[in-house]
Image: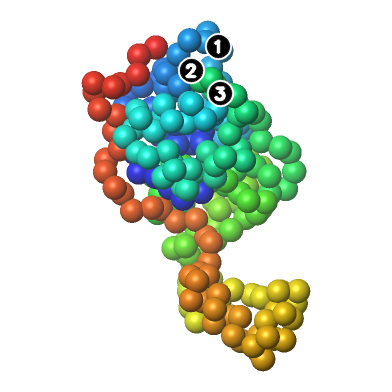
């Protein structure tokens, strides 16, 4: 299953289960096989969290390095893993409030049914400029195709950021000025570091991502 940068863990597990003709409950049980639990529904309203052993078991099942998963999926990073050294899977509803729930993925650029971590954004334009992703009211998409000015403005902004670097705050700019004589140096340094926009985008596919039949989890 191709990874999508910024995808929720629940979304990735749901897509992986579907691609392998599994019920999501089968995949979740495979990640904590010795526990009899009521497996949570993989729905946009809830996120799934794994313990470190369950993350590594998932990585083994899909034949990807665990750190590759953690780079792509924010809630598989260390700070969001369950503090448990056994195989554990937990589901938790997203916090209430503007910008706290997930954003629907752009169907033009991403796999069908993908959801993204919002990083406190209530809405954000997709990189293609043809859809805006909105997390309000359970998540929905706005088709901005009839307004090509928005896509052009997005591209111009990206080119601007690529050329000059991301915005530099007053607190981070002041020391640089005192040492180097100008804030533009900080901007150029940021540009060299690759400070392009952080709008979610689909990762290149490394493989078809399907679970090998010999390791397909059993309920
Ligand atoms: Zn898009």
Real-space Cα separation, disc 3 to disc 2, in angstroms = 12 Å
Residue with the mark numbered 2: 32
76 or 161: nearer the viewer: 76
Please tell me whether mark 3 sits on a helix, a strand or a loop.
Answer: loop
Residue with the mark numbered 1: 37
111 or 50: nearer the viewer: 50
Q: Assess whether mark 1 and mark 2 are in contact (beta carbons under 8 angstroms).
A: yes
Q: Is residue 29 above or below residue 58?
A: above
Real-space Cα separation, disc 2 to disc 1, in angstroms = 9 Å
Q: Position of residue 12 (x, y in %)?
A: 45, 36
Q: Residue at x 71, y 74 (%)?
A: 172
Q: Position of residue 126 (x, y in %)?
A: 50, 59
Q: Is 35 on the left-hand or right-hand side of 98?
A: left
Question: How many neighbours does mark 3 have within 10 angstroms: few (below 14), some (14-19), or many (20 or more)?
Answer: few
Real-space Cα separation, disc 3 to disc 1, in angstroms = 18 Å
Reading the chain from its start, which is encountered first: label 2 or label 1?
2
């Amino acid at each position: 299953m191709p990874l999508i940068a910024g995808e929720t863990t629940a979304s990735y597990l749901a897509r992986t289960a579907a691609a392998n003709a599994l019920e999501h409950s089968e995949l979740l049980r495979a990640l904590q096989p010795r526990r009899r639990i009521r497996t949570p529904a993989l729905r946009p309203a809830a996120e799934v969290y794994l313990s470190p052993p369950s993350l590594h078991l998932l990585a083994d099942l899909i034949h990807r390095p665990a750190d590759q998963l953690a780079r792509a999926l924010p809630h598989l990073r260390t700070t969001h893993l369950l503090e448990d050294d056994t195989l554990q899977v937990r589901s938790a509803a997203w916090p209430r409030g503007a910008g706290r729930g997930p954003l629907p993925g752009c169907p033009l650029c991403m796999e069908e049914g993908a959801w993204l971590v919002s990083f406190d954004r209530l809405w954000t334009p997709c990189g293609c400029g043809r859809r805006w992703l909105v997390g309000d009211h359970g998540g929905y998409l706005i088709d901005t195709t009839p307004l090509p000015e928005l896509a052009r403005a997005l591209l111009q902004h990206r080119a601007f950021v690529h050329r000059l670097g991301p915005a530099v705050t007053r607190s981070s700019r002041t020391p640089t000025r005192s040492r180097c004589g100008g804030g533009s140096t900080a901007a150029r340094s940021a540009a060299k570091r690759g400070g392009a926009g952080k709008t979610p985008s689909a990762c290149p596919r490394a493989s078809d991502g399907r679970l090998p039949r010999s390791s397909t989890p059993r309920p």
